[in-house]
Image: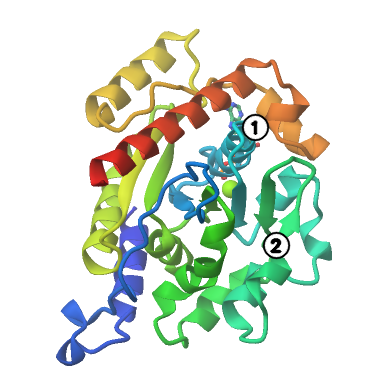
Amino acid sequence: MEESHTRIDTALDAAQVVPASQGGADGISQPAGPPVVPGPYAGGGGPRSARIIAVVNQKGGVGKTTTVISLGAALAEHDQSVLLVDFDPQGGCALGLGIEPGGLDLSVYNALLDRHCQVEEVVLKTNVDNLELLPSNIDLSAAELMLVQEVAREQTLMRVLAPLRVNYDFILIDCPPSLGLLTINALTAADGVIVPLECEYYALRGMGLLMDSIERIRERLNPRLQIDGILATMFDNRTLHGREVLERVEEAFGQWLFDTKIRKTIRFAEAPVAGEPILTYAPTSPGAVAYRKLAQEVMDRVATRQSARS
Ligand SMILES: Nc1ncnc2c1ncn2[C@@H]1O[C@H](COP(=O)(O)OP(=O)(O)O)[C@@H](O)[C@H]1O
Ligand SMILES: [Mg+2]
C-alpha cells in the first residue's frame, strides 16, 4: 500500500511539465482546452461525443478486464457504439475477444508514441457488432518509461483519443493494476471512473488510496473527472461472509455503488478461453444478465448527469 502511494506521488510529482511560474498550478500541466461535454449519442444524426470511462483499481484480479469486455459488449447490445481501449500490457481485452495480442502489427503503444501513426489505423473490429478495440500488448510496458520524456506526458492518451470521440458513444479504458503513469493517463483522458471492487475480506483495503488518487487527479489534471460508480464483483450471496462483506462495502460506498452486483461464477473464467464476451458465450447466464443491467444503469446515470448540465 505504502509502495503504491509512493508510486502515484512520484508520478504526479514527476508530471511537472509546466513550471508554476508559467501558469501550471502547482507546477503540474493543466488539461488542454475546454472540456468536451461528454455523454452517449442521443440519436438524431448529430455528431457523437463519447463518454470516456476508465475502469480502475490498482489491485489485480478484481474484474477490471472482465468488466470492460462485458460492459462494452452489453452497451453494444443496447445499440451503443463502443470502443475498448486496452491500457494494460497484458493484452487481456484482445485475448478475451479472441485476438492474439502478440501477433499485432500496431498497438496502442504506436498510437501513443509514434508521431506518424494515426490512431484510426490501430483500431480493430471485433466479432461483436458495435464493439471495436484499441489493442495493447507487451510493448505498452515500455511506454511508461518512454512517456516520461514526452511533453505533457500525462495527457498523451487524452490527445490520442480526442479524434475518436466523434465515432463512439462510449470509450472504456482497461487500466493496469497500478497507479503509475499509464493509469494517470487514463484518468486524465476520462470523464468518469468505474471501480470494480472484489467482495472479499480485504475489499476495502487500498480504496482510500484509490479515492485519494482520483481526487488528486481531478484537482491537478482533470476537473471533468467524475465517479460513475463502484461495482461489487465476485459477490457470493450464498455465504454469510459474502453478505457481510457487501454490507461493509454498502456502508462505506453506498452513494456510488451500482444496484447491479456481479456474482461469482466460473462462466467468467470460461468466456475468455472461448475468445468471446460472456454476453455471447453464455447469453442467458446470470453474469450476462447482470452486465446488461449494469449497462442500463451506466446509460441512465450518464443521461441524468447530462440533463443536469443542460
Ligand atoms: N464475477 C466473477 N466471478 C468469477 N470469476 C471472475 C469474475 N470476474 C472475473 N473473474 C475471473 O477472475 C480473474 C481476474 O479477472 P480480471 O477481469 O482479469 O481482473 P483484473 O483485470 O482486475 O486483473 C479472471 O480469471 C476472470 O475470468
Ligand atoms: Mg486486467
Question: Residue 117 location, x and y as percent?
Answer: 67, 80
Q: Is residue 185 left or right of residue 32?
A: right
Question: Residue 278 location, x and y as percent?
Answer: 69, 29
**Rendered residue at 38%/64% (across/down):** 188
**Rendered residue at 60%/40% (across/down):** 72
Question: Residue 63 location, x and y as percent?
Answer: 54, 38
Name the residue tied to disc 2. Answer: 123
Q: How many dots with numbers? A: 2
Tag 1, which secondary structure? Answer: helix
Res 111 quadrant in image: bottom right
Residue 110 in sight from this viewpoint? yes
Name the residue tied to disc 1. Answer: 77
Nearest the eye: 2 or 220: 220
Q: Earlier in the sequence, mark 1 or mark 2?
A: 1
Q: Kindly tell me whether mark 1's CB lies below 8 Å from ligand 1.
A: no
Gap between marks 1 and 2 measured at Cα: 20 Å
**Rendered residue at 29%/23% (across/down):** 250
Nearest the eye: 250 or 257: 257
